[in-house]
Image (cartoon, rainbow, N blue to C red):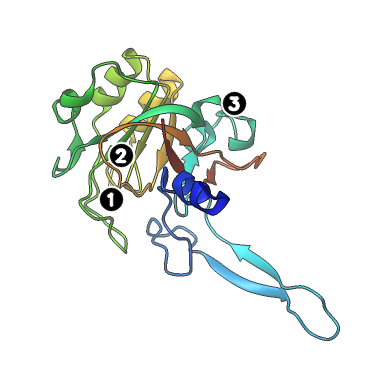
Amino acid sequence: MSPAAAYDGAMKRLWDISPPVHAGSPVFPGDTPYSQQWATTLSPGCPVNVATLTLSPHTGAHADAPLHYSPDGAAVGALDLAPYLGPCRVIHALACGPLVEWRHLAHALAGLPPRVLVRTYAQAPSGWDPALSAFAPDTVSRLADAGVCLIGIDTASIDPADNKTLPSHQVIRQRGLRVLENLVLDAVPEGDYELIALPLKLMSADASPVRAVLRAL
């Protein structure tokens, strides 16, 4: 096999589960959208392009830190990276309605690895979805009981968009779980993978963008 063929074969074993980040990327109403300006541009007097980015750390695929939902919680740069790297299971809960309940996952819970990503969309929307599906708090608690250390979802939040008490985020806080949001799981079959979704070392931020990928085991 040629090196190019081997490389192509390896790449086919990767699933990029991060949405594109650009000026049109949806964010929670009132949050800071992505924007980009050029601090310098290629010219006779300048050898490089350098961009200046403005964005919420919740733009695109991202990891929430405890600081996001707890005033004394850790910032994202202080978190252990271990939960964001390792075996995970993708479970489809299509047409689950407003909440992912335990019954929507029951068909795929045998031998559960410590990371669970849930697909709720048949196709990820291109804009903000006020009717996004979220986790039922009981589902989060039962996943924690099963030894799960990280949960992820293909919507913008593990709580309903209009919920102000954030019950599932509070379960995450109480149980010490980590969370990924805004994943794109449209093309990912149900099954087990290796997750790689490392947050940036932002030492005072409440979240971080991630480039989330799955690799076949």
Picture coordinates of residue 8 (x, y %)? Answer: 47, 51
Picture coordinates of residue 106 (x, y %)? Answer: 17, 23
Establish if 148 lies above or below 92. Answer: above
The residue that label 2 is drawn on is 159
Report the residue at 19% width, 38% height from top: 93
Q: Nearer the viewer, residue 5 or 204?
A: 5
Task: Tell me the kind of residue under disc 2.
Answer: Asp
Q: Residues within 10 Å of mark 1 (few under 14, many from 20)?
A: some
Number of marks drawn:
3
Q: CA distance from mark 3 to mark 1?
A: 28 Å
Sequence-first tag of 1 and 2: 2
Sequence-first tag of 3 and 1: 3
Task: Tell me the kind of residue under disc 1.
Answer: Asp
For label 1, the SS is loop
Report the residue at 67% width, 75% height from top: 38
Q: Is residue 102 visible?
A: no
Establish if 110 lies above or below 208. Answer: above
Q: Are marks 1 and 2 in contact (CB under 8 Å)?
A: no
The residue that label 3 is drawn on is 80
Report the residue at 49% width, 40% height from top: 63
The residue that label 1 is drawn on is 186
